[in-house]
Structures are given as C-alpha cells and as structure tokens.
Amino acid sequence: MSKKTVLTVDDALTMRKLIAFTLRGSGFNVVEAADGLEGLQVLAANAVDLIITDVNMPRMDGIEFTRQARAKLGSNHIPILILTTESEAEKKNQARTAGASGWILKPFQQQQLLAVVGKVLPGTVAP
C-alpha cells in the first residue's frame, strides 16, 4: 500500500512540526502550510488523503479554508479534521457546515491524533 499524504495547516510552526513528527512516525507523507491561503496553494499542488487544520490563523482561518478546500476538491471523500483550542459549539457547527469531518482539541496526545486519523483513514494506523 502506498503512503498516504496528509496536509497540515497551522500558523504555529511548532504545532505543524509536532503533527508532522507524529504522522511521519506512523508512515505518512506530510505537507505543511502556515495558513488557509497557503493551504489552498499546497492543496492545488499536491494530492492529499487527509487535511488537518487549525481554526485561528492569519489571512484565512480554518473554517473558511475548509469551505474553500471542499469547493476545490469537489467532494467529501477527503477527510478534514479541525485541530484547535476552540471548543465552543458554535465554532464546531460552523466547521461542520463548512465540511469538516471531525474535531480534535489542542493540546492533544500523539496516540489520540493517530486514533482519530485511523478512524477517518481506516487501515493506515496500527492499533
């Protein structure tokens, strides 16, 4: 089976590096973007199997990025996970309406992230 590619979009370099370290350790390819606008550019240049995005970012937030990514992808077959410190029901509803597949709160445990990735991309993460 070929490696799956994950796009991680977060304005915090340390968070992107932690996500990338966790996913690469489980056999994923990882491409990164610092905000929603850059995320759309990376998405246009790379075929991805999963997107993990923050909500609060400069230039374009994660909810608008999710909305535009869904429009560009033209389908819902690529999961989009929101990874954020936000926990308000209204933000979750906005993300779901925009096309998000799931929600993970920061700070996260590496095993928690891998468990959620394993749920949205079955067969990619060893239990």
Image (cartoon, rainbow, N blue to C red):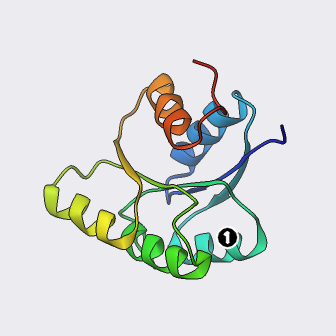
Which residue corresponds to the image point at 67% horizontal and 77% vertical from the top-left?
41
Above or below, 55 against 17 in this view is below
Q: Quadrant of residue 34?
A: bottom right
Residue 98 to residue 93: above or below: below
| Relative to 69, residue 19 above or below | above
Q: Horizontally, is 127 left or right of 26 in the view?
A: left
> Residue drawn 45% across and 70% down?
66
Quadrant of image for the N terminus: top right
Among the 4 quarters of the image, the one containing residue 14: top right
Residue 86 position within the rendered picture, expressed as x and y whole percent measured from the top left: 25, 52
Amino acid under disc 1 = Leu
* Nearest the eye: 83 or 58: 83
**View extreme (top): residue:** 127
Q: Position of residue 31 (x, y in %)?
A: 71, 55
Total number of numbered discs in the rendering: 1
Q: Secondary structure at mark 1?
A: helix
Query: Is 66 on the left or on the right of 13, as rendered?
Result: left
State the residue lying farthest toward the right.
2
Q: Residue at x 80, y 41 (%)?
A: 3
Picture coordinates of residue 28 (x, y %)? 73, 39
Say which residue appears at 35% left-offset and 63% top-offset: 56
Relative depth, front residue between 62 and 48: 48
Quadrant containing the C terminus in the rendered view:
top right
Residue on which disc 1 sits: 43
* Outermost residue, left side: 89
**Up-down relation of residue 64 to residue 22 (above or below):** below
Q: Position of residue 103 (x, y in %)?
A: 35, 48
Badge 1 density bin: few <14, some 14–19, many ≥20, Cα 10 Å: some
